[in-house]
Amino acid sequence: MQAGQDASQEGSPRAVVVDVREVYKIYDTAGHVVKALDGLSLTVEAGRFIAIMGASGSGKSTLLHLVGGLTPPTSGEVIVENKNLAQMSDRARTIFRRRRLGIVFQEYNLLPTLTARENVALPMLVDGKPMRDYEQRVAELLATVRLENRADHRPDALSGGEQQRVAIARALLNDPAILLADEPTGNLDSKQSREIWQLMRQIADEKNKTILMVTHEAQGAAFADEVIILRDGRMIGTLEPKGSADAALVAAGYQELAG
């Protein structure tokens, strides 16, 4: 089964935002060949929150990097919003990523000398656009991540969870087609992690955002609509927690498929 295959039973089918077709990603280091992705195919529909799980080396982050245009596949097609990233130049992928994708990493990547408000606006400031043009948008995003009262604080005055919420707000600044999150709670405690997962569920539901999140935690994956499980660069199965937050369901299903 492919991610996003079960279209909504009501209304028209959702548009496909991500279409990965027979993708291989092969690394050859000093004659040692590693297939990070081995003929992987999947589709993701608009507005879906998809979690990607698998053991270390299963290809989770590689898949996210390909969808994010951070690296091209060795072969196959990676189509995002009807754009074939595999056929783009590095510069074209960079522009597409900046304009249409939002990316959140395990590290928050905030500039320590800037306030939360300024860090959210950073992509526009880098493009030379005046802050005043985005003040309303930045304020709305800080409210979305529940940090409107911390807007003038610098990162060293924020908790890890608050810093990651700033990073999420920044990733949403350009109203991206997809929010990609690579182990977004890897540096957080259990309480802060749950707050981030709940926030991402809220963003998917209220903002109709497509989210792809790599995680090794069943608790986090349980907030997703669907969980893709990888092993050795291939998809070995899917689970459908449907946003239930039922970690036991995901953990049991993962063990059955990957164990």
Image: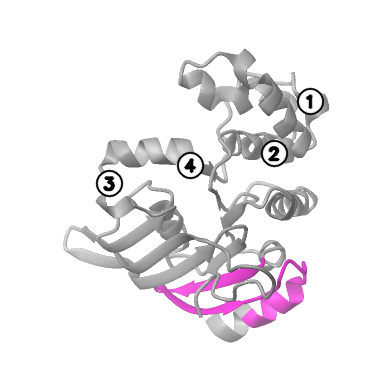
Element carrying mark 4: helix
**How far apart in space, not on screen, are marks 1 and 2 (Cα)?**
11 Å
Element carrying mark 3: loop
Q: Are marks 4 and 1 in contact (CB under 8 Å)?
A: no
Q: Are marks 1 and 2 in contact (CB under 8 Å)?
A: no
* Residue located beneath label 4 in the image: 100
* 146 up-or-down from 258: above or below: above
User: Which of the marked residues, 2 or 3, is nearer the chain's N terminus?
Assistant: 3
Indicate the amino acid at tag 3.
Met
* Residue located beneath label 1 in the image: 150
**How far apart in space, not on screen, are marks 1 and 3 (Cα)?**
39 Å
Indicate the amino acid at tag 1.
Arg
Indicate the amino acid at tag 4.
Arg
Q: Mark on residue 72? A: none
**How far apart in space, not on screen, are marks 4 and 2 (Cα)?**
19 Å
Camera-side mark, 4 or 2: 4
Element carrying mark 1: helix
Residue 107, image x and y in percent?
56, 40
Q: Mark on residue 88? A: 3
Assess whether residue 227 is covered by the magenta stretch. yes
**How far apart in space, not on screen, are marks 3 and 4 (Cα)?**
15 Å
Q: Are marks 4 and 2 in contact (CB under 8 Å)?
A: no
Range of magenta residues:
225-253
User: Which of the marked residues, 3 or 4, is nearer the chain's N terminus?
Assistant: 3
Camera-side mark, 1 or 3: 3
